[in-house]
Amino acid sequence: MIAPFDLIIIIFGADLFSVMISSRLEVYIRTIMLQGLLLFVAAVFSLPGGDVGDIILLTVETLGFKAVVTPWYLRRIIRENGIFRETEANIPHFYSMVIGSALFLFGLGVSYWAAENLAPIKPLHFGMSLSAILVGLFIILARRKLVTHVMGYIIMENGIFLLSLALATTLPGIVELGVALDLFVGVFVFGVFIKRIRSVFDEDHVAGLTDLRD
Amino acid sequence: MLITLLIVPPIFAGLLFLFPFRRTANVALGLYALIHIATAVALSARHESFTRYFAIDDFNILFLDVLSVVFVATTVYLVGQFSRANVGGRDPRYARFAAFLLLFVDSMNGAILSTHLGLLWVFLEASTLTSVVLVNYNGTRSSLEAAWKYVFICSIGISFAFIGVIFLGAADMSIRSLFFADLNRAAPSMSIFWLRLSFAFVLIGFGTKMGLAPVHSWLPDAHSEGPAPASALLSGALLNVALFGILKVDRILNLAGQSGFARGLLLVMGFLSLFVSSVFILSSVNYKRMLAYSSIEHMGIIAIGIGLGGLGVLAALLHMIGHSLSKSAFFLTSGNVHDLTGSNLIESARGLRSRHPATAALVLACFLAISAAPPFSTFLSEFLLVRALFAQNAVLLGLFLLLVVVILYGMGTRVLEISSERSPVPTVTESPSEHGKSKIPTIWGVLPQLFLLLLAAILGVYLPGPIWAALHRAAAYLGG
């Protein structure tokens, strides 16, 4: 019998595969949306007797921010710019799938190998978070559009958020810090920057950002 | 005191958004620089614990003092020299620059003062967000590119540091707190597995901000694309604050008896930084990028010093001070060079001596100060470092000297091209600025650097007793 919490984590991990194979940015957005919903459920499970303030904050963060506002904003960006596909990725999508699966295996493998050391965090929980972080980093490296980079960053951040939930009850404040990371980076910086870069460069490829090199 | 360090800058910045004039910006900056240095001096004499979250102790006072000196010199340059390029009256761009500069200093104050790991992390993140505006001041294609790389790569770094914080929380489930005092107390009983993993992530995360190789790639872009005063603060102050974050976590490992692990990682990243900077300095054609790579070099030297432990820690802290003083002087001088030649290329800066002798002399003096020539304090610190290396590992000593000499050669030939050669063909002479005002550096474009270099020389020749004692106390705090 699988515990409900484990099931959520497994869905969270399985969903990562869809971003690895797809070139359609809509799929990325749906994944990010689903991750937001799953993180909300996971947060509810992680905070059994949390105080009201915590619960409100987490609901706003996961359900409101991660599952609604971020996908909405990303969708607006891709609509306005008319980019729906990640073409000419640095690494072809088939190989992305292979490498992504390897990262996934690595994440889970490490956590089971170190299982006895992981005392406060469950191996499955740790492994899935690690996989999400690695897949997010991989997307940043393998894709070329700025918008996709931001999506990779968000996936990585969701992995970190999942990881921080493991300590939600024992380390007060840790989840709030994760929220701060999200707000700082997600809204202000990336939102503002993509607009400015587009207006100056007339393109949203990283390929345009190559004036500075040695 | 806490009010002057944390509350006043946002108020001033808010006023600047309401009154975006060049004069108000200069008054706010000048006034706050005075307040900052007065506060730093007062706190040096008497350490103070403000609240549970903010305190001054033997260790962080060193970082606050360095920040204060660099900030004051930068402000004098900014108000006296840099702002001349802008016409008087309403100037929202410059006012915004000044406002974010104040917020930037505020975030660094907060990071230095905080007694809580989470708070330190938040302030470090804030320092990226506030300084990115400074990098993008010119609003050109390349400065926007540099700003984007800066904010994106440092955000990934800061996320890694956050993973490190989570792991540190997992290392001991009983303390339920991220206050350094609690973490230090619980250190001996922490889980070694989590502690090591945590340090590795914090080192990569804050190391990104500190500019250690292999996670340094944003630094040459950001430091070279920002205007000179911004570069001076980024290099002379912000890198130290990132180092501060690493050292606070390093101390927990020392207390847990895991110093060997931390030192190994620091040594690897330190030597890698030296190697990377030597390669790029040898092939640099842009003097500001060369200075940025030199910052990576010196952060590497500091990491090596911390990694050696003992005498090396003392050398590293002294080196940090020497680097901040001379590198911020160098970056401010690069602003003069840019004003005179209208370019950041070494090629176009050749033969500066015939155009502006004072700036050419400053370039040479800054080079001597940064490359550990006596009488500057970097000589003393690198001498101590070599002694520490000699006592531990002759192979590492050889490698260190080789890399430093390569860097010295690479920078030396380029600096001599700028400062000593007579201009072969008189290229563009005084290029008038967009506003028609001449950009020849005034006395205010020379004095701040002289002040910084003088300070570096004084520390090198005669280290006053109280400063020496403060350095020893700080090194002892780290367990050196």
Image (cartoon, coloured by chain):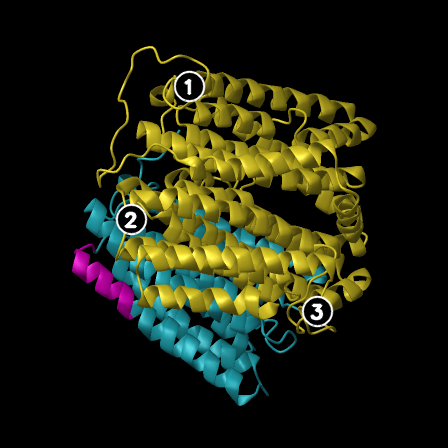
Chain colours: A cyan, B yellow
- Magenta stretch bounds: A72-83
- What percent of the width, then of the height, locates residue B444? 44, 39
Q: Does residue A31 sit above or below B217 in this rendering?
A: below
User: Would residue B162 appear left or right of A80 to someone viewing this image?
Assistant: right
Q: Does residue A164 sit above or below B330 in this rendering?
A: below
The residue wearing badge 3 is B49
Specify which label sits upstream in the sequence, 1 or 3.
3
- Does the stretch in magenta take in A82? yes
The residue wearing badge 1 is B353
- Does the stretch in magenta take in B73? no
The residue wearing badge 2 is A145
Q: Marks 1 and 3: same chain?
A: yes
Foreground mark, 1 or 3? Answer: 1
Q: Which chain letter goes with mark 3?
A: B
Magenta stretch secondary structure, dominant: helix
Residues packed near mark 2 inside 10 Å, few (<14), some (14 to 19) or many (20 plus): many
**Residue type for callout 2:** Lys
Q: Which chain letter goes with mark 1?
A: B
**Residue type for callout 3:** Ser
Foreground mark, 2 or 1? Answer: 1
